[in-house]
Image (cartoon, rainbow, N blue to C red):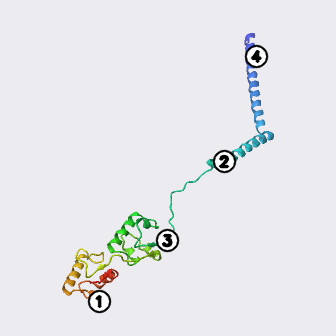
Amino acid sequence: MTRQEILGIYFLMGLVMLGMGIHAIYQYVELQSEVDLINPKHFEEIYIAQKTANRKLNFVYKSHPIYKRTFTYPHYVKKSQEWKININEADSAAWVALPGIGPGFAKRILTFRERLGGFASAEQLKEVYGIDTIWVKQHLRKFQLGKGVYRPLFVNRAIWNEFRHPYLPYAQAKVVLNFRKQHGVISDYGALIQIKLIEPSVWERLRPYLNFEP
């Protein structure tokens, strides 16, 4: 080997040693920084600083209602079970206020009541289309009749277009009118049920509505 080649080898070895020294110094600095992080005194300082910051945040949270968390629940109106209703005078709003009754049912109830001429019994609510009969049974004591029937069926005075009722089909109404034309005044219920072409059950349902005034 020539002198220049030997010097070149020494130079390369020196560079390698220098690089290894620099790498060792860098690792030492990193290790020292990690030691500082796990230093108990350093940890205590960090903990105290965080605790102080949390205390200030909690103070702001409790002092200002705007920061408080609120919970929103689905809209639900629980209708009171402590109620009573006059079924012959209640309007649509009064019916809708009851549990289980919506605007559609309220309208049906009022329409049926008007066709009847008033409810003679709370049991008749079961005849309203769509009304749950179990619901009616559960609340029978809460239904008040008030004055009851407000439009009677005048057996001896009603003309053909007035002699109408949900319990009396038109064909049967014509039978009554013909009977009255032939026999005159129908004095009472006993005389009415003598009309053999009409079932006694029909008159029994109609009985609360019948008026025999001449």
For image coordinates 76% across by 19% down, the residue present is 14
Is residue 2 among the parts visible in the rendering?
A: no
Q: Which mark is residue 190?
A: 1
Q: Secondary structure at mark 3?
A: loop
Q: Report how far apart the C-alphas of labels 3 and 1 lie in the structure.
A: 40 Å
Amino acid at dot 1:
Gly
Residue at left offset 27%, top offset 75%: 164
| Lower sequence index among marks 2 and 4 | 4
The quadrant of the rendering that contains the C terminus is: bottom left
Question: Quadrant of the image for the N terminus?
Answer: top right
Disc 2 is placed on an element classified as helix
Disc 2 crowd rating (10 Å Cα; few below 14, some 14-19, many 20+) is some
Mark in the foreground, 3 or 2: 3
In this rendering, position of residue 165 left or right of residue 67: left
CB under 8 Å between discs 3 and 1: no
Q: Report the mark closest to the observer, 2 or 4.
A: 2
Q: Identify which residue is drawn at 76% across, 33% down.
A: 33
Q: Residues within 10 Å of mark 4 (few under 14, many from 20)?
A: few
Q: Quadrant of residue 30?
A: top right
**Separation of marks 4 and 1 at Cα, in angstroms:** 141 Å
Q: Which mark is residue 61?
A: 2
Q: Tell me where residue 157 appears, x and y as whole percent.
A: 25, 80
Disc 4 and disc 3: Cα gap in Å?
A: 108 Å
The residue lying furthest to the right in this view is: 41
Neighbor class of circle 1 (other Cα within 10 Å; few <14, some 14-19, many 20+) is few
Task: Locate residue 26: give its quadrant.
Answer: top right
| Marker disc for residue 10 | 4
